[in-house]
Image: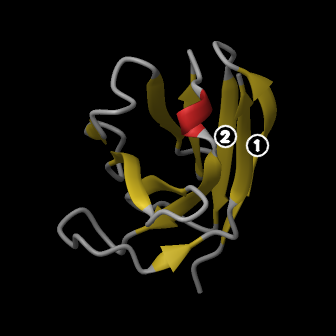
């Protein structure tokens, strides 16, 4: 069974940085999603199993960076120049392989709050 555990959320002022981590029970293609109060969950970033390919939502391009350490089965989301609108619960998710578009496995989420 795939297990995902996020960490690294917290409270930060606008313009600050945070790094989220997601420890997985194996090596999978991974993504980060977020859900703000009263809004639907939205895609943030993804990374292929090897780490060679990444993809970002337009709203975070140039500010967020996704990476992975395959020796540790851990994926990171480096978030810079944070804005109040980045406030949300952030979830990491995994897919079975790079060819499957659906994310079937989800972490418990970690809260990110950006104050103005």
Residue drawn at (17%, 67%), measured in percent from left and top? Answer: 99
In the image, 71: left or right of 63? Answer: right
Residue 4 location, x and y as percent?
Answer: 64, 67
Is any atom of residue 72 visible in this view? Answer: no
User: In this picture, is 95 found above or below 61?
Assistant: below
Q: What secondary structure is found at the residue carrying circle 1?
A: loop
User: In this picture, is 16 found above or below 93?
Assistant: above
Name the image quarter holding residue 29.
bottom left
The quarter in which the C terminus is drawn is top right
> Residue farthest to the bottom?
1
Residue 37 location, x and y as percent?
Answer: 61, 60
- Give residue 9's mark: 1
Kindly report which numbered mark, 1 or 2, lies closer to the viewer in this rendering.
1
- Give residue 31's mark: none
In the image, 70: left or right of 9? Answer: left
> Residue farthest to the right?
11
Query: Is the C-beta separation of discs 1 and 2 under 8 Å?
Result: yes
Residue 61 location, x and y as percent?
Answer: 33, 25
Is any atom of residue 105 visible in this view? Answer: yes
The quarter in which the N terminus is drawn is bottom right
- 104 or 98: nearer the eye? 104
Residue drawn at (57%, 18%), measured in percent from left and top? Answer: 80
Residue drawn at (69%, 27%), measured in percent from left and top? Answer: 18
Work out whether mark 1 precedes mark 2 in sequence or the reverse, and give the earlier one: 1
Location of mark 2 (residue): 20
Residue drawn at (37%, 73%), measured in percent from left and top? Answer: 103
User: In this picture, is 110 found above or below 85?
Assistant: below
Name the image quarter holding residue 15.
top right
Q: What secondary structure is found at the residue carrying circle 2?
A: strand
In the image, 105: left or right of 72? Answer: left
């Amino acid at each position: 069974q795939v297990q995902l555990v996020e960490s690294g959320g917290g409270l930060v002022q606008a313009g600050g940085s945070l790094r989220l981590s997601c420890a997985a029970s194996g090596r999978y293609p991974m993504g980060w999603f977020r859900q703000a109060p009263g809004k639907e969950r939205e895609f943030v970033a993804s990374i292929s199993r090897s780490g060679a390919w990444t993809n970002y939502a337009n709203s975070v391009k140039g500010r967020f960076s996704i990476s992975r350490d395959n020796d540790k089965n851990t994926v990171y989301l480096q978030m810079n120049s944070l804005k109040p609108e980045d406030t949300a619960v952030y979830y990491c998710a995994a897919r079975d392989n790079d060819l499957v578009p659906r994310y079937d496995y989800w972490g418990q989420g970690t809260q990110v709050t950006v104050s103005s």
